[in-house]
Amino acid sequence: MTDSENPTIPERFERVRAAIAEACGAAGRSPDSVALVAVSKTQPASAIREALLAGQRLFGENRVQEASEKWPALRDEFPDIRLHLIGHLQTNKAEDAVALFDLIETVDRPKLARALARAMAKLERVLPCYVQVNVGREPQKGGVDPDDAARFVAECREQHGLDIRGLMCIPPVDEDPAPYFRWLAETARSLGLPDVSMGMSADFPEAVAAGATLVRVGTALFGPRQAA
Ligand SMILES: *Cc1c(COP(=O)(O)O)cnc(C)c1O
């Protein structure tokens, strides 16, 4: 029996995929113009395995240490997994991150851009990256200032040789995210960046409406997180 108040992980994936398709339909977008990043931070390997068996291959983790404990074994089993780093990255973990992840979504300062460029050269492994923008200018959040985004993208490319493919943001929790989402999509477009990573469990349909090409969803797919 299916309990609609306590859905299984495959049921949750079905619902979120349907909601993305519906938001795409309403916005006149093709459903495959939006990638679902399943945010598996704090989730045990058993939950991730259920997601993998439900067909999910794209995942996001916010900590290098935690990801390095969970993912190598899962990758052996599912070689087509793609893993995005979506959390703050310390420069001294840049090499571990480059070795483990397929894309870094949180490039947000010159020192980190330089550390990533060095790590990629050393490991001979080139990862696409996104620049994180602190759209609400919140002191506790990572990301470049919105006014500095264009300049920083150029710096990452020209001085550090990074392959910047998109922008990422986490809007303030207590405000309407739609204006922030529209700003990020418009800024990415104006910079010629194809990828726009925005929208979480609470607001991914709004993000799709505003032009997200990736949504990062955790709770709606896996249920509540255990404390980290
Ligand atoms: C945890 C997290 C998410 C997912 O949040 P939910 O509300 O659980 O969907 C998305 N993006 C980032 C950067 C996160 O840290």
Image (spheres, grey):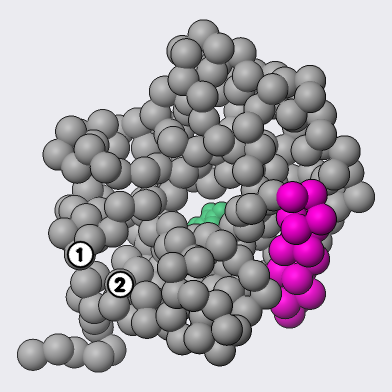
Question: Overall secondary structure of the magenta stretch?
Answer: helix
Q: Would residue 144 be seen by someone viewing this image from the given angle?
A: yes
Q: Quadrant of residue 114?
A: top right
User: In x, y percent, where is residue 118?
Assistant: 61, 13
- First in sequence, mark 1 or 2: give its number: 2
State the SS at label 2.
helix
> Mark 2 sits on what residue?
13
Q: Say what amino acid the circle numbered 2 marks.
A: Phe
Q: CA distance from mark 1 to mark 2?
A: 8 Å
> Mark 1 sits on what residue?
54
| Circles 1 and 2: CB atoms closer than 8 Å | yes
Please tell me whether residue 130 is drawn above or below residue 207 in the rendered image.
Answer: above
Residues drawn in magenta:
174-192
Q: Say what amino acid the circle numbered 1 marks.
A: Ala
Please give the name of the residue rendered at 24% of the width and 70% of the height, measured from the top-left corner.
Answer: 9
The reply, left or right, for residue 170 in relation to residue 99 is right
